[in-house]
Image (tube, grey):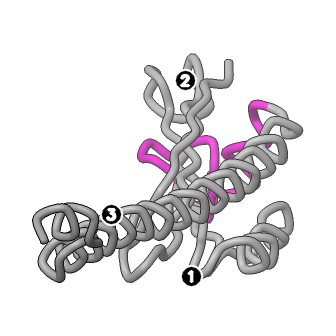
Amino acid sequence: MMLRRRQSGFSLVEVSLAIGLLGAVLVAISSLFVIGGKRVRQGRERTEALSVATHVMETLNQMSFRGLYTNFSVASNPGGAAGPISIDSRTTTFSAATGWQPLIDEKLEGGYVLVTLTRLNGADFRTSEGIRVRTTIFWDDLNRTRNLTLEAVRF
């Protein structure tokens, strides 16, 4: 009788414990796959945002120093503007920037670009030593607004 008891299989408690442990490990591993999938999607969106921001910066780099503040200023004397000039892709009517929003809509959900031109020294843009060009892309990601900023200085 003693010999037979030692050769018997696992008890119900042991089997239940093993199944519970296996289930916990599988839940932990599957949650890692879900988190990994979200990170891959966020990385893809960040790459798309960087692509759009680079496109915008390349468009602005094709303009001359003077062309930067004259093309985007609404002032009657663009060179005399002292404050920063902001360009919003959702509302701009300037021909150089009208192609930005369709590109953003194609790549990013709820996205738009905000370009800010700030003079460096000098009383106005005409007499400034340089222009700081800041391009910020905004987009929606799981009910949160994300952004990415590129910045350059033109002399």
Query: Given this view, does label 3 or label 1 mark the residue nearer the observer?
Result: 3
Instruction: Choose the circle earlier in sequence order: 1 or 2.
Output: 1
Q: Element type at marker 2?
A: loop
Residue identified by numbered label 3: 25
Q: Position of residue 107 (x, y in %)?
A: 74, 71
Instruction: Name the residue furthest front.
Output: 1
Q: Earlier in the sequence, mark 3 or mark 1?
A: 3
Sooner in the amino-acid sequence: mark 2 or mark 3: 3
The residue singled out by tag 1 in the image is: 110
Q: Position of residue 70 (x, y in %)?
A: 72, 49
What is the magenta range?
Answer: 65-85
Residue occupied by mark 2: 128
16 magenta-colored: no
**Closer to the camera, 107 or 92?**
107
Distance, label 1 to label 2, CA atoms, is 35 Å
Nearest the viewer among 108 and 19 is: 19
Say left or right for 117 vs 78.
Answer: left
